[in-house]
Amino acid sequence: MRPFTYTSATNKEQALKASTKTSHYLAGGTNLVDLMKEDVERPDQLIDVNKLDYKKITSNEKGGLSLGAMLSNAETANHPEIRTNYPLLSMAMLSAASAQIRNMASNGGNLLQRTRCPYFFETSMPCNKREPGSGCGALKGMNALHAIFGYSDNCIATNPSDMNVALAAIGATVEVQKKDGSSRMIEFTDFHRLPGDKPEKDNTLEQGELITAIHLSKPEFSDHYYYLKIRERSSYAFALISVAAGLQVKSGVIAKAGLAMGGVAHKPWKLSKAEEFLVGKKPNKSKFEAAADLAMKDAKPFEANKFKVEMGKNAIVRALTQAYEREA
Ligand SMILES: Cc1cc2nc3c(=O)[nH]c(=O)nc-3n(C[C@H](O)[C@H](O)[C@H](O)COP(=O)(O)OP(=O)(O)OC[C@H]3O[C@@H](n4cnc5c(N)ncnc54)[C@H](O)[C@@H]3O)c2cc1C
Ligand code: SF4
C-alpha cells in the first residue's frame, strides 16, 4: 500500500475543507481500503468521516424516511421503521456481503462502491476505469459477469450494489454537501452514470462532494415486495442478476410498480417501461411475463453472458410473483 496521511473530521466543514483532488473520504473502508491494498485506488489523504453526525434515520417532508450517510448498512436494514415501511430495501441490504461487512459498511459508501470487474482489480491488465485510455480488458476477454444494457466500447462493467437496486425501485434522492458549503439533491436515477467515454466516472458527484443523506420517497411497497438475488453461492457473493420488485395492489389491480435490476448495467437498471406496463393490470403470470419481455427486449449481451437474458426474464417473473403472493 502506498503512503497516505490520515485526517479525522469532526464536522462537515472540516471534511470539505480537507478534501483535495487526490484525497478520499473514509467511511467503513470495506471497499476503499481493499482497493488501496490492490494499488487500484491511490489517495494521498484519507479523511475519516465516521465522527460526522449523519447516523440517524429521520422523517422527511416527502412523507418518507431519510437515512444518514454514515449509518451502517446493518443498522439501516434492521431498523424497525425500515423493516416495516421499506422491507424491500431491508431485504436487499441483508442479502449483501456478510454480517461483519454490513456492520462496517456505511450507506454513503455503499452507493459509491466500485465495480467488481476482475480486470479493474488486476493492475497488470488494461482497464479504462482504473487507467483511462488503457483499453478495456473485459470487452474481448472474460465477460460472463458483465453488462447487457447501456455499456460502451470503453467499459462493460456492472454496478455491484444490492442497496442501489432497491433504491432505484422505490425512489430516492441523495443529498450532498458541496465544497462551497451549499448542498444539492440528486435524483437517485441520476446519481449513477453509464460509462460512455468517461468510464472512470461511476456517478455524478463532483470533486470533494460529501454525501450526507439518502431521502426515501413515501413508502409504497410495504405489502408486496421481493428482492431476488441470483448468485454463484448463497452468501458472501455479488449478484449475477438481481431484481427488486415492489407492487401496490388496489381492488385486485396494480396501482403502482417499482422494478429495477442489478448485475446488468453500469448503474442500477430501472425498468421504467415494465413498471408503466404493469399499472392497471391484474397481477398474474401472463402480465408478469409480458413485463419481463418488455424489460429485456433491448438487451445486448456478449457471447459469454447471453444466459443473463433468459435468466433476467425468469428472475423478473419470479420476483413479481413472490412480491404479489407475499403475505403482508
Ligand atoms: C467480501 C465482500 C463482499 C461484499 N458483498 C457485497 C454484496 O453482496 N452486495 C453489496 O451490495 N455489497 C457487497 N460488498 C460491498 C460493500 O457493501 C461495500 O464495500 C460497502 O457498502 C462500502 O461502504 P463503506 O462505508 O465501507 O465505504 P468505503 O470503503 O469507506 O468507501 C467507498 C467509497 O465511498 C466514498 N465515500 C464513503 N462515504 C462517503 C460519503 N459520505 N460521501 C462521499 N464519499 C464517500 C469513499 O471515499 C470511497 O471512495 C462486499 C464487500 C466485501 C469486502
Ligand atoms: S469493463 Fe470497465 S472496469 Fe472492466 S476492464 Fe473494461 S473498463 Fe475496466
Image (tube, helix red, strand yellow):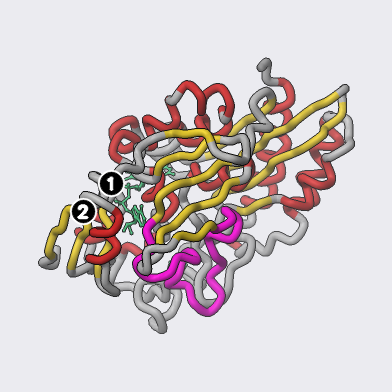
Mark 1: few/some/many CA within 10 Å (<14, 14-19, 20+): some
Which residue is the extreme one toward the top? 327
- Where residue 115 sits, quadrant-wise, is bottom left
Residue on which disc 1 sits: 52
Span shown in magenta: 186-210
Can I make out residue 264 in this image?
no
Total marks shown come to 2
107 to 75, vertically: above or below: below
Element under disc 2: loop
Q: Is residue 11 left or right of residue 55?
A: left
Mark 1 near ligand 1 (CB under 8 Å)?
A: yes
| Distance Cα–Cα, label 2 vs label 1 | 7 Å
Can I make out residue 30 in this image?
yes
Q: Nearer the viewer, residue 13 or 212?
A: 13
Q: Nearer the viewer, residue 216 or 89?
A: 216
Tell which circle, 2 or 1, labels the residue nearer the N-terminal end.
2
Q: Looking at the picture, which amino acid does disc 2 mark?
A: Ala
Circle 2/circle 1 CB separation < 8 Å:
yes
Residue on which disc 2 sits: 9
Residue 153 position within the rendered picture, expressed as x and y whole percent measured from the top left: 55, 77
Q: Which dot marks residue 35?
A: none
Element under disc 1: loop
Q: Nearer the viewer, residue 96 or 177?
A: 177
Q: Would you say residue 307 sits in the magenta stretch?
A: no
